[in-house]
Image (cartoon, coloured by chain):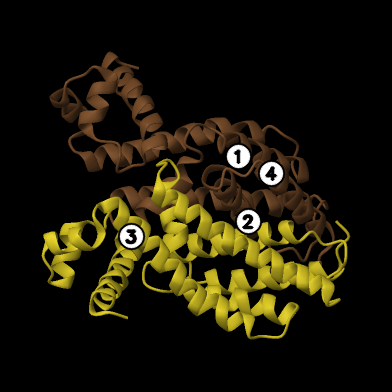
Chain colours: A yellow, B brown
Amino acid sequence: MTKGEETRQVILGRAFELASVLGVSGLTIGRLAEETKLSKSGLFAHFGSKENLDVAVVEEASRQFVQEVMVPALREPRGEPRVRALFERWLTWGQRPGGCFFVGAGAELDDRPGPSRDALVRACHDWIDELAKAARIAVREGHFISSLEPEQFAFELYGLMLSFHQYHRFLRDPLALERTRRTFDRLVASARTRSR
Amino acid sequence: MTKGEETRQVILGRAFELASVLGVSGLTIGRLAEETKLSKSGLFAHFGSKENLDVAVVEEASRQFVQEVMVPALREPRGEPRVRALFERWLTWGQRPGGCFFVGAGAELDDRPGPSRDALVRACHDWIDELAKAARIAVREGHFISSLEPEQFAFELYGLMLSFHQYHRFLRDPLALERTRRTFDRLVASARTRSR
């Protein structure tokens, strides 16, 4: 990494933290300048525009997500253990300050077409595909029933994660984690037996 | 209704539509003035501040939600038919322009303590309580199994609605509605039989 790349990485890490808590629209070049003690013109030199900064933040979020959630889960044995690991790692990710960046940013950007929304949609599809792939492997390993549709399982698992976010972050429900785990156990139990 | 109340109601209806599409933070007194052809000072006379306007918009959203989702569903027979009606009405509500107001606003306001967030949390709790109540009645009617925990069922149903919002609004997935209905059928089928 060159010095310039290193600086950019430090800025992006901070920008990602800010966007997690303040939302993508709350992250401004001015605020980032204050937080990093860099000049606004210096930041413009790195990113060019607020829009480019937003895309870079989504990419940084994806990079961290891959590193903290996907990579460790992919080290677990194929099949149900890997499905469980993806879920547990995501739960930990969803308890960071600001909650899951992708859920918050998704709601923020759903009506704003543009490169940041596109980057976010790509990241969500990657994650859903990863969940479906893990379910498909669990079918192949004989852990889940052969009639299970992996995309439907991924849809349900993804919705569970959205619920957790809503109950934990928005409703501040102390039972959020427990309810989420119970639903997950039921979802996995039914993947072992269900015929639809 | 006095003339003043009528005017206020018309303004609120428009404000709610705007906030559904632009988000609560996108709804400004200036924008609302443009849309309603009223003066900003006139709008301030009605609402006093942007914050009061936001609270009034959340209350207007709740009023419409009760009228369009809850009241018609409560006319359905007690038990599973009413649970289904709540779900179907909500699906229709969630397909309005901007999607479900509450889901969008929840994500927007989750880190902003204040009266609008409080009003929104109240509305969400009311809705979740209504779902749990409908499940409780379905247990009492013998449609759902007696070991079903109504709050857990409500959590899962609520999460399904969040998934629908995310797949429909954000990912623009053409299968969103179909996947949501399939999960709902599975959820109801398991409420008839599950022991956990």
Front-most of residues B39 and A108: A108
**At which x and y percent is residue B150?**
67, 59
Q: Which residue is mark 4?
A: B175
Picture layout, residue B114 above or below residue A134: above
Q: Earlier in the sequence, mark 3 or mark 4?
A: 3
Label 1 resides on the chain identified as B
User: Residues under labels 1 and 4: Cα distance?
Assistant: 17 Å
Q: Which residue is mark 3?
A: B111
**Which amino acid type corresponds to the residue marked 1 in the rendered image?**
Trp
Q: Residue furthest front?
A: A2
Displayed quadrant of residue B75: top right
Q: Which residue is mark 2?
A: B154
Judge left or right: residue A69 versus residue B8. Answer: right
User: Residues under labels 3 and 1: Cα distance?
Assistant: 26 Å
The residue at 25%/29% (across/down) is B31
* Image quarter hosting the N terminus of chain A: bottom left
Q: Are marks 3 and 4 in contact (CB under 8 Å)?
A: no
Q: Label 4: how many residues lie within 10 Å, few (<14), some (14-19) or many (20+)?
A: few
Q: Which residue is mark 1?
A: B90
Q: Earlier in the sequence, mark 2 or mark 1?
A: 1
On whether disc 3 and disc 4 are found on a single subunit, the reply is: yes
* Image quarter hosting the C terminus of chain A: bottom right
